Image (cartoon, coloured by chain):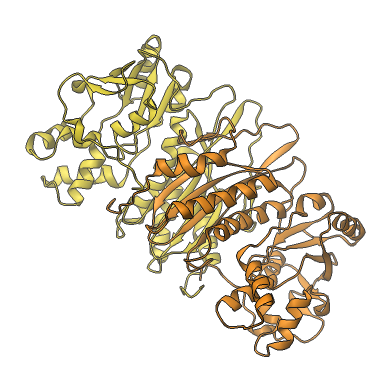
Chain colours: A yellow, B orange
Amino acid sequence: MKSIKNSLSEKFIINKYLKKLNFKNKGTFDFENDGAYLGFNSKHYKLTVTTDSISEDIDFFSNDDPKSIAQKITTVNLSDIFAMGALPHSYLLNLHLPNHINENWLNLFSSQLKKIQNKYGFYLLGGDISKSNKLIVSSTFFGSIKKKLEIFQNKFNLYDDILITGNIGESKIGLEILKKKISSNINLKQYFIKKYLYPIPCKIGPLIANHVNSMKDISDGLIGDLTDMLNDKYGALINVNKIPLSGKTKKILNNKKNFRLEDLLSDGDDYELIIISSQKNRNKIFDIANKNNINVTLIGKIISEKGIHFDSHLDVKNIKKFDHFS
Amino acid sequence: MKSIKNSLSEKFIINKYLKKLNFKNKGTFDFENDGAYLGFNSKHYKLTVTTDSISEDIDFFSNDDPKSIAQKITTVNLSDIFAMGALPHSYLLNLHLPNHINENWLNLFSSQLKKIQNKYGFYLLGGDISKSNKLIVSSTFFGSIKKKLEIFQNKFNLYDDILITGNIGESKIGLEILKKKISSNINLKQYFIKKYLYPIPCKIGPLIANHVNSMKDISDGLIGDLTDMLNDKYGALINVNKIPLSGKTKKILNNKKNFRLEDLLSDGDDYELIIISSQKNRNKIFDIANKNNINVTLIGKIISEKGIHFDSHLDVKNIKKFDHFS
């Protein structure tokens, strides 16, 4: 026990790389306390919380750029915060670091975190560092939302609209390219790999929170996450031709016979949002999306017949919900 | 990537073992949502947060009883909450599970969590499960404390009392017995091993919060944690004979020449509290301790000369602060 040695002490890492992410907020750990007072005291807002981990060999490759790992751990959590209709407030980090992590790695990792913190306006409260033989990063994010608002994943009504932000499947294609299961020209390759390594959360959630019934981010493929939302109570009828795909994705699907639309729906960390909302709010949501340059597409509606149904043939019997764990 | 297979799905583990720990609190993940609304809305209390991880081969042995692992992950966090003067409110779990984790393990682990939740009155908000080749458990705990109270680890004055709860060194002796570096009779063995496997947080923190200047739990040995509190600003003068040791510990120290008091101060997850308080509050603190059947011992005072000084000879030059990470 306690036999693993490394030249970088916990204190060194904290002082040199993590303290700067604290953005001088008082009452936080400041990394000199074992705990923090959450500087959150509002009459009008309440606190939301979410937690997620990413692990070497499961969610990223061991030699991935540390900037990509920083991007992924923040996006996976920010995406949940936005899906709750909340804005990010602060976060905690649990770093499980193997021996090969060096100062260069820590510098790139913490610089990317700082960049993302500045972009969305949140800060690091504190955390915990331990040794591990594989790299694992866990993070707990806090968000703020108006006190009267609550958005759950499965509270909606029959015939509600099913909408989706952005385009589907690009991260999955990037992963398949990295695994050498898809080849393409160099420009397309770089485009899709970037989508896989640097996913961006869709921030429309808090902007439309007043007008939706449910929201969820896509982290396990559209079908898996929509199935979770339906919760075996309702069904969904999806208009296959409406599923938003970029021109580049269509090119890949046309060129590659063994790789089909189904593969892009059953898996993939899209981090786009599935939005379920009343038909009467449809135009309002499109208006807000347009004003913020975010693509939102109506892809179907909630029906009473359980399960996910497609209006044209899709070989979905082979589509299985991806389980990060099993 | 995603190649690890296991018969237990994330959903199965959540439904069978984790949902019951939610204690039917609304607004929480309920494990059907990616996030939770922290059901905390008080005029008089504010929220504190702390996070800690424990890892196989560092903080526990791989074949340790799952009940011990549940005890450790809660004690390491509860201990921080109590040291802040707060009461536990709720928590999140990040479970990184290797393949050998089976239903029996999950049953024992979650039953122990339930028992501890009932004892101290807090509930599971939600969490995240992923695969790992080593068992790692991270947890984030939320506590509540009166709005005007803030207890930091290093805000105290010259000549303040240094007090300590319970007895020191028993968990460390238990670990040395498990590592076969100390032998003893079977009764003593069982006593100390239990202290190592089932550490109990000292809950006096919130009871004396009005009367102390600083508190910190001992998770890296008395010397390491006191050094952190002194923060290179002050020093401590410790009365060696006052350091609280149980009769059983004294027996071990008398019998074992290679194992000394110094070894019990430089390392060890005691989870007792170091309390630094004004002399004028000494009797008040002892009164509260007595009423609650908690032992508190005055072991020294804050002095201006930096470092930790002992009133009789201790071979402390070999004592190094234990760093869980390096």
Asked if residue A148 is positioned above or below residue A173 in the image, the reply reads above
Residue B244 shown left or right of residue A161 in the figure: right
Q: Is residue A53 visible?
A: no
What x and y, as percent, mark residue A82?
A: 44, 32
Residue at figure coordinates x 55%, y 59% from the top left: B69
Q: Which residue is drawn at 48% across and 75% down?
A: A3
- Which residue does the image show at 92% across and 59% down from the upper left? B283
Quadrant of res B286? bottom right
Farthest-out residue, top: A280
In the rendered structure, the answer to whether residue B155 lies left or right of residue B18 reads: right
- Please tell me whether residue A158 is drawn above or below residue B203 in the rendered image: above
Instruction: Give x and y (percent) for residue B245.
Output: 77, 74
From the viewer's perspective, is A246 left or right of B122? left
> Total marks drawn?
0
| Place of residue A59 in the rendered image (x, y in percent of width and height, measured from the top left) | 33, 50
Compare residues B210 and A7 and report the one nearer the observer: B210
